[in-house]
Amino acid sequence: MRLFVVSLGCQMSVADGGELAAPLLARGFRPAAAPEDADAVILNTCTVRQHAEDKALSLIGRLRPWKEERPERVLIVAGCAAERLGEWIRGRFPHVDLVVGAKSIDDYPRLVESALASRFDALRESREAFADGTAAPGDPIGWPSPAVAPLTIMRGCNYSCSYCIVPAVRGRESYRALEAVLAEAREKAAAGAREILLLGQTVNSWRARGPDGIERRFPDLLRAVAAVPGVARVRFESPHPFFLDDALVAAIAETPAAGLHLHLPAQSGSDRLLSRMRRNYTAASFLEKAGRLRAGVPGIEVSTDIIVGFPSETDEDFARTLDLVERLRPAWAYTFKYSPREGTDAAAAPDDVPAAVKEERLARLNAVCDSFAEAALDARIGRTVEVLDENGGYGRTRDGFRARWDGPAQPGRLRTVRVTGKSKRTLRGECT
Ligand code: SAH
Ligand code: SF4
């Protein structure tokens, strides 16, 4: 039995792909190289922007002939678009066997068991064995590197940014207990992971009361995970600026294993729009936080997310966004055209920035962001950097840049690389 997993969207979605695969792997499924070779396909969807959702729906449509060719095959559609459009998907695509929304991931082992039982009777095992199947560290399904292990520490989001569908499809925040997180980190390190990537929608809002009744917060968790034997690096995605406080800055500064990179989504530089977006900061307070971070953690790189064309965005608002980006000097940026998501507050207002204006602003923004990204890469040429070999000659520097190098491939090893050049946003170099 062969399984193929496609995960669209953020790293949490890719990590969820591993969790969705686990019960099938526990039942004896093995990874397939392509859907044509697979008896089961899991399509883990994203809905954060319309484009992501369209892609998911088009993939479901394209799997119809695959299913018709061998009707005993199983197609599972999961994730955020499945949460938003579950009923509609069931009606529109009868070839889908199971639709599991993002909020039902805890219930998923039970759901998938009944979906599989009718088809793969020979593989039935006890429910207990089935339910505890967690993805093997370094699971080849969907996750790109055995040296980097994703570890989901919280799910959901308690914010209500007016443009964002995430709280609707992922629900309120819930946090895993520190002991459970540490147990998983130990297990993953023992299986060969050198880097732990802590994941959550607003990952640094994590907090949990231990058996001693004391509440731990994210900076405590970061320090504790970094202390797990075998863990050489800890990174986290995606932090919310609100929870970037002095305690977190100190934890990053004092934890040698902490990655020297922080993704800090700004979204806009216009206070008027930030307020309409319901981000709980101003451009000035955002920049002030970034400045405190840089002062407290010398050498740390910051990247960001920006949305252009939010309803009512004027030239003046956009100029303020460019100004924020120029002051922030991000090492890289993910830039998006605003995409109205049904049911969000922002979608109640007219999507009134014309498409051509959104396009033009995006191009101008990208030109500025690209110049910073290229400058950051150029500054590294001629230097030596530490890289974690993720996939044999490919990996990331401690401050988050992608790198490729010549020399022996040793996944899981930290290596010193002399940077000789760059191409396609990736440092090039050779092992020293
Ligand atoms: N929790 C993270 C972001 C998660 S969504 C945070 O708050 O920082 C990832 C990114 O998608 C966001 O940072 C935002 O830039 C973008 N995004 C979310 N909803 C969007 C929408 N409706 N249109 C365009 N971009 C959007
Ligand atoms: Fe969406 Fe805002 Fe929550 Fe991030 S913090 S997931 S942008 S609602």
Image (cartoon, rainbow, N blue to C red):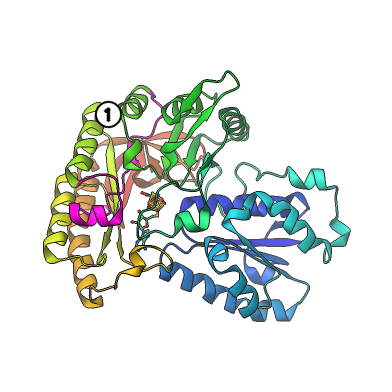
Residue 80 in the figure: left or right of residue 292: right
Instruction: Give the number of marks.
Output: 1
Residue beneath disc 1: 297
> Where, by quadrant of the figure, is residue 77 drawn?
bottom right
Q: In which quadrant is the N terminus drawn?
A: bottom right
Q: Nearer the viewer, residue 422 or 151?
A: 151
Residue 390 drawn at (x, y percent): 48, 44
The quarter of the rendering in which ligand 1 is drawn is bottom left
Relative image position of residue 221 (x, y in whole percent): 48, 28
Q: Is residue 301 magenta?
A: no
Q: Is residue 108 above or below residue 89?
A: above
Residue at the (19%, 50%) spot, across then down: 372
Which residue lies at the image location 23% right of the left edge and 71% below the top edge? 358
Ligand 1 within 8 A of label 1's CB?
no
Relative horizontal placement of residue 240, taking residue 268 as reference (left or right): right
Residue drawn 47% across the image and 35% down it: 206
Can the viewer see residue 226?
A: no
257 part of magenta stretch? yes
Which residues are the magenta region? 255-282
| Vertical order, 296 against 358 (above or below) | above
Q: Quadrant of residue 88?
A: bottom right
Quadrant containing the C terminus is top left
Q: Main secondary structure of the magenta part?
A: loop
Would you identify the image quadrant in which residue 202 lies? top left
Number of residues whose C-alpha sits closer than 10 Å to that of mark 1, classed few (under 14), some (14–19) or many (20 or more): some
Q: Position of residue 185 (x, y in %)?
A: 57, 32
Check disc 1 and give the amino acid type.
Answer: Val
Query: Which residue is situated farthest in the top direction here?
Result: 212
Q: Residue at x 45, y 56 (%)?
A: 166
Task: Say if residue 280 shows up in the picture.
Answer: yes
Q: Secondary structure at mark 1?
A: loop
**Of 288 and 352, the residue lying toward us:** 352
